[in-house]
Amino acid sequence: MQPDTSKDGAEEPPSCRSLNSLKEFRSAGRGFWSHVPGSDWNNWHWQLTHRITTLEQLQRLMPTLTPEEYAGTQLANQKLALAITPCFFNLIDPADENCPIRRQVIPRLEETHTALWEMADPCGEDAHSPVPGLVHRYPDRVLFLVTDRCASYCRYCTRSRLVSNASGYDFHPQFEDQIDYIRNNKSIRDVLLSGGDPLLFNDEKLEQLLSRLRAIPHVEFLRIGTRIPVFLPQRITPELCAMLKKYHPLFISIHSNHPRELTTEVRDALGRLADAGIPLGNQSVLLRHVNDDATVMKAHIQKLLMCRVKPYYIYQCDLIAGSAHLRASVREGIEIIEKLRGHTTGYAVPTYVIDAPGGGGKVPVSPEYVLSRNADRVLIRNYEGKLFEYPEAADGTPLSPAPMKEFEEPELA
């Protein structure tokens, strides 16, 4: 089936070679599914039921598969299942094999190649799991894994060992044990629900979990990590938002990587969450040929702010097995941050982090703006490369005349 490109039909899939202007929010439309009634298209259960999950479906909708994509899709279910919602699939440019949407969700043969430094569990979550489905790596917070299912599967997924059960991990969360652990550890004040995607639960099941966690006195706030607003904006119903509103303080971190993902449907879904008083942050992953470009990243973060979402983190792609073809360099990430700082509002500039391999936690990585320092002065540079001295003597004592070049500490690498 080819997309309907007639003026009277659904709009053709947008090209991923160009960026939307910051004020342009284009609808994904029904595209390949132009024959589907709107009542079905806007139903999140219909979207899940009609996901692209097989090579045959993929070939029928996109006969331009490359040999690498064809072979990768044949082998996908041995590692991480193929699944793409129709609304997200419509963002793919079938004429562009380097389309940044396409690279994120369509398997490639390179996924079967594992570099020596790549791992099944790059963040060391299993080693910090006191009970199945709970990760306690930081002193005052825990990661609560609730499911191994997602609406669509990102090919660079940090938890590809777990999600979709393609690799036979056989994940079974144990909610009673997880909640008991949190209840019995009064240092835990912050619980992040993730998985898989918690928003795949129906409203009732999700509320049962939130209400039990909210009833624990020392749990101060709850967070949800989700890509549902991007993969499945139809799920963000008024009913869901009304339910979530009851459990403040509640924060939601979404996951978007490219400005093309922020369609009118996604913008409106995020608006419903924001109207419910839920603070929204975005976590991106730095990906080769997706967002490893300062122009693309700047357009993306500015568009996020227009969707009422604070750009929160850019992650260096974890050392997940089979992800080398999607991994940009740390040097490129630092250069991107340097080209953002001072060139757009500070609200838009996320923190670039590496999740230290093996379970070391998030480590911020940024350009060096402190060039040298001693007891008297700090030498700093601004985004333009201009140098400035800042006095360190807090009590008004006259500074020594020592020039900056005589500082004991060398310039930071």
Image (tube, rainbow, N blue to C red):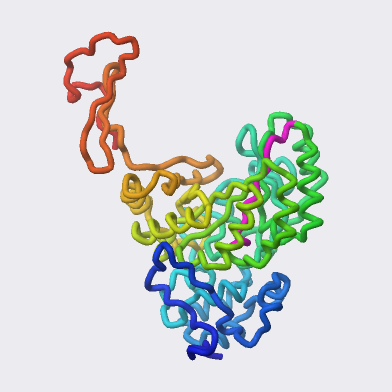
Would you place residue 111 above or below residue 356 in this image?
Answer: below
Question: For this view, does 71 lie left or right of residue 147?
Answer: left
Magenta includes 224?
yes
Would you place residue 66 above or below residue 359 in this image?
Answer: below
Q: Could you say which quadrant of the image residue 135 lies in?
A: top right
Give how far across and how far down residue 160 sits, in percent.
Answer: 60, 60
Question: For this view, does 178 lie left or right of residue 390?
Answer: right
> What quarter of the picture does the N terminus occupy?
bottom right
Between 226 and 144, the residue placed more toward the observer is 226
Give how far across and how far down residue 222 sits, in percent.
Answer: 68, 43
Between 336 and 87, the residue placed more toward the observer is 87
Q: Could you say which quadrant of the image residue 413 lies in?
A: top left
Between 6 and 133, the residue placed more toward the observer is 6
Give how far across and how far down residue 269 sits, in percent.
Answer: 61, 61
Q: Write the residue at 49% across / 83% down.
A: 12
Magenta includes 258?
no
Give how far across and how far down residue 103 sits, in percent.
Answer: 47, 70
Q: Write the residue at 58% across / 80% down.
A: 30
Q: Is residue 126 visible?
A: no
Give the tally of numbered discs.
0
Q: Write the residue at 79% across / 48% down.
A: 175
Would you place residue 354 above or below residue 181 in this image?
Answer: below
Q: Which residues are magenta?
A: 218-229
Q: Is residue 61 visible?
A: yes
Question: For this view, does 151 lie left or right of residue 67?
Answer: right
